[in-house]
Image: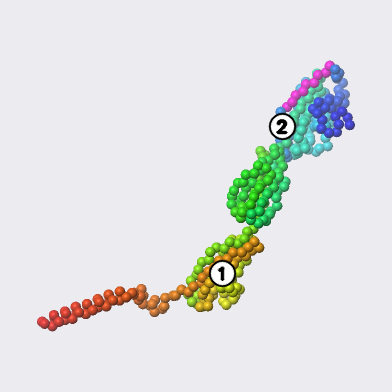
């Protein structure tokens, strides 16, 4: 297995491995024995890079350099100009007296870890180590499926996400808009009501970015019918009774006259349904049509009903319309007119008698 084994090794093991590697290359120069040699070690600041970006690993040389190498954990990336890594994303950028630089393209999470640059100079060996931290934008990896429940049920939604740093999660009811507090992956909705039905959005966010996905909750409940509105229609005219029901799933409607059910195209009556609205239309109202009606809305969770009155209204006759506004008078008005006419006649007779004297 070697000095350090096949897997992750300690920083000290990396140093030992790097210098054993350097000694593999003859230089013609004397190498200090293990007893009297000293190693300069330098630790650089961490390098933080986002997943998918490119990172450059620079190592200062100086003095007279005999051997150089870049190592990652137990893997040798480069020994001088010789590439030991089989990863095509790793390449040599610069190697001279001043600098030994390699780059890693399209950084992945598996690239995170300790990297060591080992340099053998004419005076003493030297190592420079740096730790790469890989940041990953959030991704929602598990979200509850769309669900349908009955009103009053307990509902729990699940939203799981990955990312570095680990993302925070926020739940939001999109319509009607409402931000819901949740400190973990679960959103509990106990005793859910119809007002809590709708589209829920889970947003995972960290310093790098965010990801959002939605889940639909359908809440079923029994119909609730609005109060019926009585309608007055003149004989021979058309009229409409309207029945509105709030229900999920949508309700089926039934219409009744007294205790007898009415069907479409029955005695000149048309029934039309438009989702939550049902219309009972009379094309030509007859005397037999006047009376009490009821509408029943039904779905699998229950039913609700309301009642209506279709009553007759009297339209003005044609003779009344021809006479104009003054055609209809009360008794006092008629009596007053009679007195005025009588007074006028007496006044005229008195004037005539006065004139006949001359």
Q: Is residue 92 magenta?
A: no
Horizontally, residue 86 falls left or right of residue 58, namely right
Q: Position of residue 195 (x, y in %)?
A: 60, 54
- Distance of label 2 from label 1 (alpha carbons): 76 Å
Q: Position of residue 256 (x, y in %)?
A: 58, 72
Farthest bottom residue? 356
Colour convention: rainbow
Q: Residue at x 80, y 21 (%)?
A: 39
- Secondary structure under tag 1 reads strand
Q: Residue at x 81, y 26 (%)?
A: 12
Q: Earlier in the sequence, mark 2 or mark 1?
A: 2
Is residue 277 in view from this perspective?
no
Compared with 8, 220 (above or below) is: below
Which quadrant holds residue 334? bottom left
Q: Residue at x 66, y 38 (%)?
A: 207
Compared with 63, 281 (above or below) is: below
Number of the label disc, if any, that sits on residue 47: 2
Q: Position of residue 318 (x, y in %)?
A: 41, 78
Residue that label 1 marks = 294
Compared with 29, 177 (above or below) is: below
Per the rendered image, the range of residues in magenta is 36-44
- Secondary structure under tag 2 reads strand
Farthest top residue? 36
């Amino acid at each position: 297995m070697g000095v350090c084994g096949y897997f992750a090794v300690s920083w000290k093991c990396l140093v030992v491995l790097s210098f054993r590697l350097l000694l593999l290359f003859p230089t013609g120069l004397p190498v200090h024995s293990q007893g009297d040699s000293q190693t300069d070690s330098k630790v650089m600041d961490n390098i933080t890079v986002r997943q998918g970006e490119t990172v450059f690993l620079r190592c200062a040389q100086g003095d007279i350099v005999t051997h150089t190498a870049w190592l990652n954990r137990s893997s040798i990336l480069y020994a001088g100009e010789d590439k030991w890594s089989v990863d095509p994303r790793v390449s040599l950028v610069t190697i001279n007296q001043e600098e030994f630089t390699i780059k890693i393209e399209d950084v992945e999470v598996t690239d995170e870890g300790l990297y060591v640059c080992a340099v053998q100079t004419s005076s003493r060996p030297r190592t420079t180590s740096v730790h790469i931290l890989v940041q990953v934008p959030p991704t929602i990896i598990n979200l509850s499926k769309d669900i349908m429940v009955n009103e009053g049920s307990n509902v729990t939604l699940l939203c799981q996400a990955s990312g570095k740093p680990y993302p925070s999660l926020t739940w939001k009811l999109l319509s009607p808009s409402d931000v819901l507090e949740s400190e973990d992956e679960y959103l509990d909705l106990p005793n859910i009501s119809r007002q809590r039905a709708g589209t829920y959005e889970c947003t995972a966010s960290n310093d790098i970015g965010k990801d959002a996905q939605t889940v639909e909750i359908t809440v079923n409940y029994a119909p609730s019918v609005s109060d019926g509105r009585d309608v007055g229609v003149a004989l021979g005219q058309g009229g409409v009774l309207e029945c509105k029901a709030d229900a999920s799933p949508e309700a089926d409607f039934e219409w009744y006259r007294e205790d007898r059910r009415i069907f479409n195209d029955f005695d000149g009556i048309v029934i039309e349904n438009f989702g939550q609205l049902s219309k009972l239309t009379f094309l030509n109202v007859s005397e037999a049509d006047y009376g009490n009606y009821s509408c029943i809305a039904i779905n699998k969770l229950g039913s609700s009903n309301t009642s209506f009155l279709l009553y007759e209204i009297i339209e003005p006759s044609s003779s009344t319309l021809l006479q104009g506004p003054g055609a209809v008078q009360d008794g006092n008005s008629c009596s007053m007119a009679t007195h005025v006419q009588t007074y006028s006649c007496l006044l005229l007779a008195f004037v005539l008698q006065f004139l006949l004297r001359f």
